[in-house]
Image: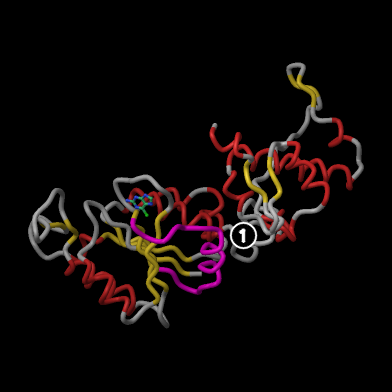
Amino acid sequence: MRIDVVTIFPEYLEPLNVSLVGKARARGQLDVRIHNLRDWTHDRHNTVDDSPFGGGPGMVMKPEPWGEALDSVLESGEGRPVLVVPTPSGLPFTQELAVELSEKPWLVFTPARYEGIDRRVIEEYGDRLDVREVSIGDYVLAGGEAPVLVIVEAVARLLPGVLGNAESHRDDSFAPGAMADLLEGPVYTKPPVWRGREVPEVLLSGHHGKVARWRRDEAFRRTTANRPDLIERCDPAALDKHDRKLLAELGWEERADGRFGRSASAVEE
Ligand code: 6GU
């Protein structure tokens, strides 16, 4: 996979040289190219922003440098990339989108600073490319560079051969079909007793069936506590008798359609 990033802070993308993504690059599984947007400015101050038409606070990124930068990046490769535009007003970035992007040969990212990029840039490239405006969550960051790091890591670990073990993503929280979209439960390693705290006995039992059941129960406990919304939209067909019994014990009510909802008393908390 090839990834291009156009930014006014190339050094912000240095973490892409490290760890999983860095190793994938070193092995030639990932071709990452970072570009400085200011290389496509022509004035003495390398200006990339200007005040917004219509007034208001902050600055807007000018269209001309982005147009020249993106034309240059597009000319340097074969075919059409997917253009990923990080913005707090984009569609939520999910594991499903990570999987979809991991199947593309070429991604181009346009992290913005200030109040964002002149809208005409997104329209211009939207006519030619598959453009995805993406948000990484319900909070506001100062720029799109951190979201690029997040998205690239989520995508890179899905590339064939990058994690080493294809089984590793099967149980990822949010992997399609994994544990029916439950959060992963706790994990343990040696020593079996640390500061008087024991590893749950079932994990030492060697009984694979009991271990799987325990892990699933723990996944339900975590999910009900941290992400009740995931339980509420859980496909009833993914729940066995034991799951239903556990959810009832945790104070959840089974509805007529088989879905679960927090009992009225629990929702108030
Ligand atoms: Cl993609 N950009 C910025 N600036 N803030 C965000 C975001 C993106 N996603 C969540 N907050």
Task: Please state if 204 lies on the left or on the right of 106 as rendered.
Answer: right
230 in relation to 194, above or below: below
Mark 1: amino acid = Val
Question: As drawn, is 220 to the left or to the right of 148?
Answer: right
Crowding near the residue tagged with mark 1, few <14, some 14–19, many ≥20 C-alpha atoms within 10 Å: some
Secondary structure under tag 1 reads loop
Provide residue 91's location: percent of width, then percent of height. 41, 61
Which residue is depicted at the point 60% across and 34% down? 265
Residue occupying the point 86% across, 35% down: 202
Q: Which residue is found at the position 12% from the left and 58% from the top?
A: 52
Horizontal and vertical percent position of residue 14: 40, 49
Q: Is residue 38 magenta?
A: no
Q: Which residue is mark 1?
A: 162
Q: Residue at x 9, y 61 (%)?
A: 53
Residue 201 horizontal/vertical position (percent): 86, 30
Boundaries of the magenta span? 89-107
Q: Quadrant of the C terminus?
A: top right
